[in-house]
Amino acid sequence: MANSRPFADLLSGGWRDLPFEPFRDGVDVHYLWQVEEGPVWAFLRYQPGASVPEHLHTGLETIIVVDGVQSDESGTYGTGSVICNPPGTRHSVWTDEGCVVFIQWERPVEIL
Protein backbone atom coordinates (compact mmCIF):
# COMPACT_ATOMS: atom_id res chain seq x y z
CA MET A 1 0.00 0.00 0.00
CA ALA A 2 3.02 2.30 0.11
CA ASN A 3 3.13 5.03 -2.52
CA SER A 4 6.41 5.66 -4.31
CA ARG A 5 5.64 9.24 -5.40
CA PRO A 6 7.36 12.08 -3.52
CA PHE A 7 4.98 13.43 -0.89
CA ALA A 8 5.56 17.04 -2.00
CA ASP A 9 4.33 16.06 -5.49
CA LEU A 10 1.16 14.57 -4.00
CA LEU A 11 0.48 17.69 -1.92
CA SER A 12 1.05 20.04 -4.86
CA GLY A 13 -1.59 18.45 -7.09
CA GLY A 14 -0.39 14.90 -7.71
CA TRP A 15 -3.33 13.70 -5.61
CA ARG A 16 -5.52 14.41 -8.67
CA ASP A 17 -4.00 11.34 -10.40
CA LEU A 18 -4.70 8.95 -7.50
CA PRO A 19 -7.48 6.35 -7.75
CA PHE A 20 -10.14 7.20 -5.17
CA GLU A 21 -12.84 4.88 -3.81
CA PRO A 22 -16.05 5.58 -1.87
CA PHE A 23 -15.56 6.30 1.86
CA ARG A 24 -18.78 7.99 3.04
CA ASP A 25 -21.66 9.67 1.23
CA GLY A 26 -20.01 12.49 -0.74
CA VAL A 27 -16.47 11.60 0.42
CA ASP A 28 -13.93 9.48 -1.46
CA VAL A 29 -10.62 8.13 -0.15
CA HIS A 30 -7.22 7.08 -1.43
CA TYR A 31 -5.20 5.20 1.20
CA LEU A 32 -1.43 5.74 1.17
CA TRP A 33 -0.95 3.62 4.29
CA GLN A 34 -3.44 1.61 6.33
CA VAL A 35 -2.97 -0.82 9.21
CA GLU A 36 -5.96 -2.44 10.93
CA GLU A 37 -6.49 -0.78 14.32
CA GLY A 38 -3.39 1.31 13.61
CA PRO A 39 -2.23 4.34 11.68
CA VAL A 40 -3.76 5.49 8.42
CA TRP A 41 -2.45 7.99 5.87
CA ALA A 42 -4.98 8.96 3.22
CA PHE A 43 -6.33 11.64 0.95
CA LEU A 44 -10.03 12.42 1.40
CA ARG A 45 -11.90 14.16 -1.42
CA TYR A 46 -15.11 15.86 -0.25
CA GLN A 47 -17.83 16.87 -2.72
CA PRO A 48 -19.47 20.28 -2.11
CA GLY A 49 -21.84 19.99 0.85
CA ALA A 50 -20.35 16.70 2.11
CA SER A 51 -19.88 16.05 5.83
CA VAL A 52 -18.68 13.52 8.38
CA PRO A 53 -20.81 13.16 11.52
CA GLU A 54 -19.53 13.82 15.01
CA HIS A 55 -16.76 11.41 15.94
CA LEU A 56 -14.32 10.79 18.78
CA HIS A 57 -10.57 10.60 18.21
CA THR A 58 -8.99 7.61 19.96
CA GLY A 59 -5.56 8.75 18.75
CA LEU A 60 -3.98 11.82 17.18
CA GLU A 61 -5.53 13.06 13.93
CA THR A 62 -3.57 15.42 11.69
CA ILE A 63 -5.15 17.10 8.66
CA ILE A 64 -3.56 19.18 5.90
CA VAL A 65 -6.05 20.96 3.63
CA VAL A 66 -4.55 20.61 0.14
CA ASP A 67 -7.44 22.11 -1.85
CA GLY A 68 -10.62 23.98 -0.96
CA VAL A 69 -12.05 24.70 2.49
CA GLN A 70 -12.93 22.34 5.36
CA SER A 71 -14.86 23.34 8.49
CA ASP A 72 -15.57 21.98 11.96
CA GLU A 73 -16.97 23.40 15.17
CA SER A 74 -13.65 25.16 15.88
CA GLY A 75 -13.27 27.00 12.59
CA THR A 76 -12.91 27.11 8.83
CA TYR A 77 -9.63 26.01 7.25
CA GLY A 78 -8.45 26.88 3.75
CA THR A 79 -5.75 25.41 1.53
CA GLY A 80 -2.48 25.02 3.45
CA SER A 81 -4.10 24.81 6.89
CA VAL A 82 -2.87 22.16 9.32
CA ILE A 83 -5.28 20.90 11.98
CA CYS A 84 -4.33 18.60 14.87
CA ASN A 85 -7.01 16.85 16.91
CA PRO A 86 -5.54 15.12 19.97
CA PRO A 87 -6.86 11.87 21.45
CA GLY A 88 -10.14 12.37 23.30
CA THR A 89 -11.36 15.26 21.14
CA ARG A 90 -14.55 15.12 19.11
CA HIS A 91 -15.94 17.10 16.20
CA SER A 92 -17.91 16.85 12.99
CA VAL A 93 -16.52 17.98 9.63
CA TRP A 94 -18.15 19.62 6.62
CA THR A 95 -17.37 21.58 3.49
CA ASP A 96 -19.57 23.98 1.60
CA GLU A 97 -17.46 24.21 -1.56
CA GLY A 98 -15.68 20.85 -1.46
CA CYS A 99 -12.11 20.10 -0.46
CA VAL A 100 -9.28 17.61 -0.52
CA VAL A 101 -7.32 16.87 2.64
CA PHE A 102 -4.39 14.70 3.55
CA ILE A 103 -5.30 12.99 6.82
CA GLN A 104 -3.42 10.88 9.33
CA TRP A 105 -5.21 8.85 12.00
CA GLU A 106 -3.05 7.33 14.70
CA ARG A 107 -5.96 5.06 15.70
CA PRO A 108 -9.48 4.56 14.34
CA VAL A 109 -12.17 7.12 15.14
CA GLU A 110 -15.50 6.26 16.76
CA ILE A 111 -18.59 7.70 15.03
CA LEU A 112 -20.92 9.06 17.74
Image (cartoon, rainbow, N blue to C red):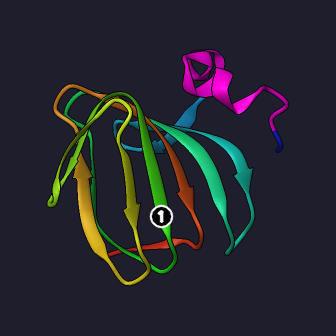
**Residue for badge 1:** 61
Q: Residues within 10 Å of mark 1 (few under 14, many from 20)?
A: many
Name the residue: 73% across, 50% down: 33
Observer-nearest of 17 and 87? 87
Residue 46 visible to the viewer: no
**Callout count:** 1
Residue 28 in the image, given as x and y percentages of width and height: 48, 36
For residue 95, what is the image quadrant? top left
Q: Secondary structure at mark 1?
A: strand
Residue 102 in the image, given as x and y percentages of width and height: 51, 41
Q: Which residues are magenta?
A: 3-18
Observer-nearest of 16 and 64? 64
Residue 56 in the image, given as x and y percentages of width and height: 36, 76
Residue 25 visible to the viewer: yes
Vertical order, 29 against 92 (above or below): above
Query: Viewed as shown, does residue 43 lie left or right of 64?
Result: right
User: Would you say residue 15 sits in the magenta stretch?
Assistant: yes
User: Would you say residue 111 sits in the magenta stretch?
Assistant: no
Query: Viewed as shown, does residue 48 lie left or right of 18?
Result: left
Name the residue: 34% across, 36% down: 26
> Where the N terminus falls, by quadrant?
top right
Observer-nearest of 17 and 81? 81
Vertical order, 57 against 66 (above or below): below
